[in-house]
Amino acid sequence: MGFFKDRGLDPATTPVWVCAHALNQHDLGAELAGGVRSGPFVRALALADGAVSIVDENGEYFTRVWCALELYMSLVGSLRRSEHAVVTALAKPVSRGRHEGAAHVSLLEGFAVEDDGDSERKLARESEFPSDLLVRVDGFTLDAAQASRPEDLEEIKLQVGEDARTLEATLRACFLNGRLTEALLAGPEASALLDARLSDVRASHLRLLSLYFEGGATEERTHQLMAALPGTLRALLLEKAHAAVLAPAVELVRRDQLERLQLRYCDLKAQAASVLAKTLAAAPGGRLTTLDLQGNDVGNEGARALAKALPGSRSLTALSLPANSIRASGAGALAEALRVNHALRDLNLRYNDVGDGGAVSLAEALPHNKVLRNLVLSGNGIRDEGAQALADALTRNQALRNLDLQGNEIGDEGALALAEALPHNQTLQDFRLGDNRVGDGGALALAGALSHNHALQSLNLGRNERIGSKAENALRAAWVSSTVSGAPRVDAKLDMMKNT
């Protein structure tokens, strides 16, 4: 069940195939009469959307040739279209930190839901994976694999064939990110270890690489890493890498290799945003769909440069620019681009300083935009004027699904305007207004609007300390008594935490 939580999957609607049930262990001869390739194990795995390696406490999984075949099909062969995971139960639940109480840990190619796309959180979560099992991952070789039937061992090794080295390298490159990071941050004495780690990356079929460099990586080590990236890589997510990462990353975009590029806190500045923008503009229909430049201080200049690339872009669907010192003029440039852009679905401007001016510009653009689904403006110094403009936009925009205004300075006047807009909007599903200055008047206005809105599924008004208990109770009562899409609203989707 823990894996389902990590991936955000519903166990009630997500079918799972257990490989141990694929073969009748009491009649293997009949089951495999046509050979391994035509047997039920391979046929069933070929139909799956992904695979999960459930590893026992002794790591015996990594000694069995049938498990090696599963890894091969998932990491190198016909199943490479989906992400793989390695999961194990813990002898004792985690006793500290944000993962306290967890009874399992997953090594994922991508991110768990709780990682929220953050490489540092991923590293912390996966650090709980037992070190003795990581040794098994590190030491995995196809040559050492075993099988109950010698003929199965021979046939599976023959099927993997010359891809054995690729399989071994891909397993290590996918699931030993922490050890790769350690080698990249170590001193000259670890050069041999680093060479081995980078050799695995180079020889692998790695699709996603996520690394967090606590304290930052040197220019030399950054160049070494970038030079080792394989042609199969589709997502590069680095945090606190050296600014030297820019040129090779841009080259990967120019070659139309990457689908996702995330360079957080890499000290890139406005010039880097301009270089990336020119690369995007030169290939408006390229492969890149997601660009995340959080924490690079690109400022208004960088925002304006990226905005120039948006009108013609047909591929970029998500642009994330949190903590980049973007003010009203930068937000205004992005707003102008939204008027004519037909691809961007997600825009994240969290922790900037767009203020009311930027909010008004974005609000004026929203009625002209038919594709933007998610807009994050939390922590931007927006007050009632900006909230009122956004409220007006909600009455004329039927595309936005999620609006995040947390951590601003919106009071009752802004909340009242937003409440008046809700009955006229039947598309917004997730609205976040927590950590503002909303009081009883704003809360009661929102409560009154709920009976006339049947789309909103989630509402966050937590940490608005001016909301008293009576207004909070009235809002809770209105929430559970109203409906969304004909069904009662879910109580857990109303967040009023620490209001009184």
Image (cartoon, grey):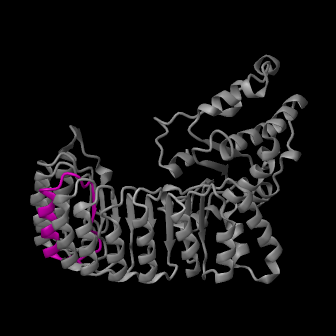
Looking at the image, can residue 174 be seen?
yes
> Is 173 above or below relative to 50?
below
Q: Nearer the viewer, residue 480 or 309?
A: 309
Give residue 366's position: percent from left, percent from top. Answer: 19, 61
Give residue 206's position: percent from left, percent from top. Answer: 65, 56
- Compared across the picture, whether 140 is left or right of 354 comes to right
Residue that appears at 53% across and 52% down: 6
- Compared across the picture, whether 199 is left or right of 349 comes to right
Per the rendered image, the range of residues in magenta is: 382-409
Q: Identify the residue at the far right of this view.
A: 150
Q: Nearer the viewer, residue 448 or 199?
A: 199
Residue that appears at 74% across and 67% down: 198
Q: Which quadrant, please, contains the N terminus?
A: top right
Residue that appears at 10% across and 71% down: 413
- Residue 497 forms part of the magenta stretch: no
Q: Nearer the viewer, residue 365 or 239?
A: 365
Give residue 479's position: percent from left, percent from top. Answer: 20, 51
Residue that appears at 66% across and 43% down: 74
> Is 316 above or below relative to 301?
above
Q: Identify the residue at the far front of this view.
A: 282
Q: Quadrant of residue 209?
A: bottom right
Q: Which quadrant, please, contains the C terminus?
A: bottom left
Give residue 180's position: percent from left, percent from top. Answer: 70, 68
Looking at the image, can residue 500 be seen?
no
- Residue 387 forms part of the magenta stretch: yes
Labels in figure, total? 0
